[in-house]
Image: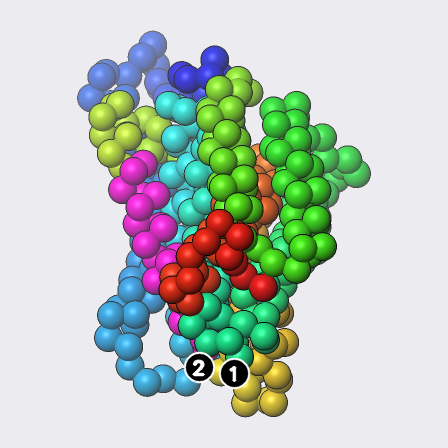
Amino acid sequence: MRGGGRLAIAHERPFPCHGRAHPSGAARLLVTRERFTGQWAAIGLAVLACVPGIVLRITEPHIDPLLESAVYGIAILGAAFLLTWGAETAEVDISQGLALAIIAFIAVLPEYAVDAFLAWEAGSDPEKAAEGLAIANMTGGNRLLIGIGWPVVFLIFFYRRRLKELVVSRARALELAFLAVATVYVILIPLRNTLTLADTIVLVSMFVIYLVMTSRVESEEVELVGPARAMGSLPDVRRRVLVVVTLVFAAAVIIASAEPFAHGLVETGKKVNISEFVLIQWIAPLASESPEVLVAALLAWRGRAAAGMGALISSKVNQWTLLIGTLPIAFMIGSGDWGILQGLP
């Protein structure tokens, strides 16, 4: 495994011999398949949960906004399960830090889509720029990620383990260091009252360096369980192909479902006379942040709370660097005015 880490697949319980020392090879193979039946069924159910959202996205029928949000929300939940299992299995071949970074990148894709659209709209319409909706959505998402995501992971950890302290491994030190540097840089941006292409160069470069360094960090030994164990039991080529297909499928479902999920929530909010700014800052981020929180919560529930917290920390690094860094590009595409010091007000 890359990065010097090790990963083990949980062993099956001994086959009940009933008078024979060992079962035949065929019997052992049959037992293995039977033991993995439940795991493959779980993967199939997660895929099926995504199907209604895909069909709804393609056909785009006019339905009640609340029902629309429910269908897309279930699709996002199914994709979050697939994303978790795929990333866990990927740790067979790559470092845990890089696997968590991939989780964070895919899970934050809905927020990229929403913020990029709002930044482009601000560039093409000065009135929209004055409303500051792109920044409102981003700050709302950050508030929900830290204010809800981090406590949820700890509460699940406490419920499952009855421990009052969640010890984050030293492997997370790299993420925390980049998060600290990025946070200080981003805090200084409002002092200039603009987010420019120069900030894009700095922040995107920081993200690239983070990915390179993360891929080289040694990983702790991890034991695959559940559906990830079934996927990890496959031969190398089949396992890697399945992991890639799973991650791509989960990413596609999340991207396809997040915007209409948010739209359904916003339309439902408008029915009760909630302002657009409040909807963008509080309701829409529920859609964009839900994949990240769900993935972290699933990891915590499966006894990997430290990895779940690591995924959330990696998401914050992603948001403070690549997400914020790409907003000026979307703004300038909308405005048609390019320059190193041009950017989002």
Residue plotted at (52% across, 31% down): 210
Tell whether position 154 is magenta. no
Residue plotted at (37% across, 23% down): 93
Residue type at the position of mark 1: Thr
- Count of labels shown? 2
Numbered label attached to residue 39: none
Q: Nearer the viewer, residue 190 or 277?
A: 190
Q: Is residue 253 above or below residue 58?
A: above
Q: What is the span of residues highlighted in magenta in the rendered image?
A: 243-265
Q: Earlier in the sequence, mark 2 or mark 1?
A: 2
**Which residue in the protein does label 1 denote?**
268
The main secondary structure of the magenta stretch is helix
Q: Is residue 68 visible?
A: yes
**Figure quadrant of residue 260:** bottom left
Circles 2 and 1, Cβ within 8 Å, touching? The answer is yes
User: Helix or strand or loop: what does disc 2 sit on?
Assistant: helix
User: Helix or strand or loop: what does disc 1 sit on?
Assistant: helix
Label 1 crowd (10 A; few <14 / some 14-19 / many >=20)? some
Numbered label attached to residue 65: 2
Q: Nearer the viewer, residue 222 or 186?
A: 186
Question: Which residue reaches farthest top?
Answer: 21
State which quarter of the image contains the N terminus: top left
Label 2 crowd (10 A; few <14 / some 14-19 / many >=20)? many
State which quarter of the image contains the C terminus: bottom right
Image x and y of residue 140, in percent: 63, 63
